[in-house]
Amino acid sequence: MILYKVEGGIAVSMEITIKLNSVLKRHCGDPAGKIIMKIDEGTKVGQVLEKIPIVKGEAEIIILNSKLVQEDAVLRDGDVIELYPVMGGG
Amino acid sequence: MNMANGYIGKIARINLTTGEVNIEKPDDLFYRTYIGGKGFIAYYLLKEVPADADPLGEDNKLIFACGALTGVPAAGMPRFSAGAKSPLTGAFGQSDAGGFWGPELKKAGYDGLIIEGKSPTPVYLYINDDEIRIKDAKNLWGLDTGEAQEAIRRENGGGSIKIAQIGIGGENLVRYSCIINELKHANGRNGMGAVMGSKKLKAIAVKGSGKIPFADENKIKSISKKFLEIYMDNPLSRGLYEYGTAGGVAGQNAAGLLPTRNFINGEFGGANNIGGETMADTILKKREGCYSCAIRCKRAVEVQEEGLSVDSRFGGPEYETLAAFGSLCEIDDLKIIAKANELCNRYGLDTISTGCSIAFAMECTSRGILNKEFFEGMEVTFGNSSVVLPMIEKIARREGFGDILAEGTKAAAKRIGIGAQDILLTVKGQELPMHDPRGKTGVGIGYAVSESGADHMRAGHDTLFSKEGFSLDSVKPLGILEPVDVYDLSSKKVRNFIYLHDWWSFFDMAGICDFGPAPRGAMSVNDVVELLQAATGWDISLWEMMKAGERSINMARCFNIKAGLKKSDDMLPERLFAPLKNGRQKGTSINKDEFTRAISLYYSMMGWNEDGIPLRSKLGELNLDWVEI
């Protein structure tokens, strides 16, 4: 498990879980690919993607609480994001 | 004009009716105009094969063609094309393979082979540098590919001999039989194995001692070294190394786009059991690769159980195979799928069309179109893994109902009658690959307009270009500068498809693997240009390469028009215009009117008329005035 703390957060702090799948796991110290992150209220998925050490554009499939979403989805306390890598044929 | 480097400068023409062998030496202009692979195939089909030829008759020709970069010592440059009029589609047929056979053919002294006529008895070709011999293969006919490879090596002193061959699928003219080299690299699609079988040609064994000449070997070395330094940092190349194409199963399923239950569904409950990670943790024996390629995306798997063994010599299942025998048939037994893959490679069957044929049969049962009696007592139902291996045997041997399925699902549906044609999933008679265009419409355009029937490797997929990031950045030199939504069917999507189709068509001409360079691999667009310059010595540009790709597309199109294909052949099956029934994209479909407009727009952008026929002015612009349609 890796904990990322967002500096300069505003009053309300929330915690989300990010699950990296398949080859994305290489970016994470946890073999299960799990990251717990504290975020500020109003944080969007895209902002979270910028804070984890993946290559830009690498996480193509974004699932928030079991539903497909885009990077503009706003996060809530306790949310679970699952990320899958891009695949382009083959 | 001096002959370019990178090529050998010789093409062997072998007539199996007369036994004559002639060596032709095309000039530099021919090579620079048609490049190789798909370009050579289109040239010879247009020039020499009557458009109304029976694909399994004496008039059809089977062309093996390397490209300018086949055998260059860099990642992703091992490929060659096999082509003919396809017995599955009746259209332009072309299928490419990696491995080691293509580079070996060039080292033996040939850029390509043109196989003509038909031998009265089984034969194989033995090529050892200048020696080309047509040898008796009566004792090889009926052997599986593993047995035949051993026998040919024994007969010719073993060593580094490389063998491309057919199995009993090709011998029995299964219309989606393939050509296999080194037991695991396939010219999989379009039924090129059946064309080879129709000519009674079991195998082409090649041994080469020569060296392919390159204009600037130091430059090639530096590009290759640069690739080795960066490829493991590229997410796509890294993914291919770690999990092979099998790594795609989990993501496609998560996205709700894993073809399931014959494309009725997009999510499969057993997906995790058949994916790349499970394979890596269970049956994976080793990672393998092609000539000079560091990516090593190939898998070799092994199973040793009582009643079920899988021989790693035949490689391992790709994503397409896992989905075709797995989710499409609702089967989550990885070992059975691995065995299905091994059998297809032993018998020389295309795993996509074979899996699709079984799924088609399963849906026929579920809808009451066919019953247990038709299947000779077998319960051919979704999820019943016990029927998969016996069905492959029956198809390969054309036994009982297998004889009907061996004709391809389009012909089978016609024979079965009412109801079966409504569930058909083909374009131009070729079964759909394992990518659902409902979630990536550019793939749908590719399926529809592909010269060879439904094909997922005509252009990079929409998902690579729908967001800002490394893969979109990689194609900016092609003029693709901004993200386009995966569901979009506007001019932006059509334009992107055209550029990407030109780019990958050039790959099919030059002998480049789609997994080496951008957008699916780590080598940059500009490095591909420089590699081609270094190999050939030509001052060739990206612009000229893209025009060459466009030329090959137009040539293949012209062959299809002469063969009688129409605008109506550029259309997706009805199921893709209906909503997905489960998963995260439940309810998603393609709007047929929008799709039809996109195809018309594609014709227009291509310089084709409203019926999809290239204008004379377009043919003139591509230096194809000689093509008559």
Image (cartoon, coloured by chain):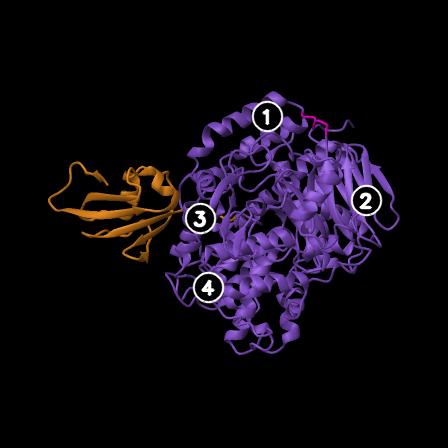
Q: Nearer the viewer, residue A47 or B123?
A: B123
Q: Nearer the viewer, residue B615 or B71?
A: B71
Q: Do labels 1 and 3 share a chain?
A: yes
Mark 2–mark 3 CB contact (< 8 Å) = no
Which numbered disc covers residue B135? 2
The image shows residue B7, relative to residue B316, as above or below, that is above
- Estimate the x, y position of residue A34 in percent, counting from the top left: 27, 45
**Which structural element holds mark 2?**
strand
Q: Which chain carries label 1?
A: B
The span from disc 1 to disc 2 (Cα, nearest Å) is: 38 Å
Q: Is the magenta stretch mostly helix, strand or loop?
A: loop
Name which of mark 2 and mark 4 comes first in the sequence: 2
Name which of mark 2 and mark 3 comes first in the sequence: 2
Residue to which mark 4 is pinned:
B330
The residue under label 3 is which amino acid type?
Met
Mark 1–mark 2 CB contact (< 8 Å) = no
Q: Which of B147 and B64 is in front in this view?
A: B147
The span from disc 4 to disc 3 (Cα, nearest Å) is: 18 Å
**Which structural element holds mark 4?**
loop
Residue to which mark 3 is pinned:
B279
Name the residue rendered at 68%, 46% in the picture. B552
**Which structural element holds mark 1?**
helix
Mark 1 vs mark 3, foreground winner is 3
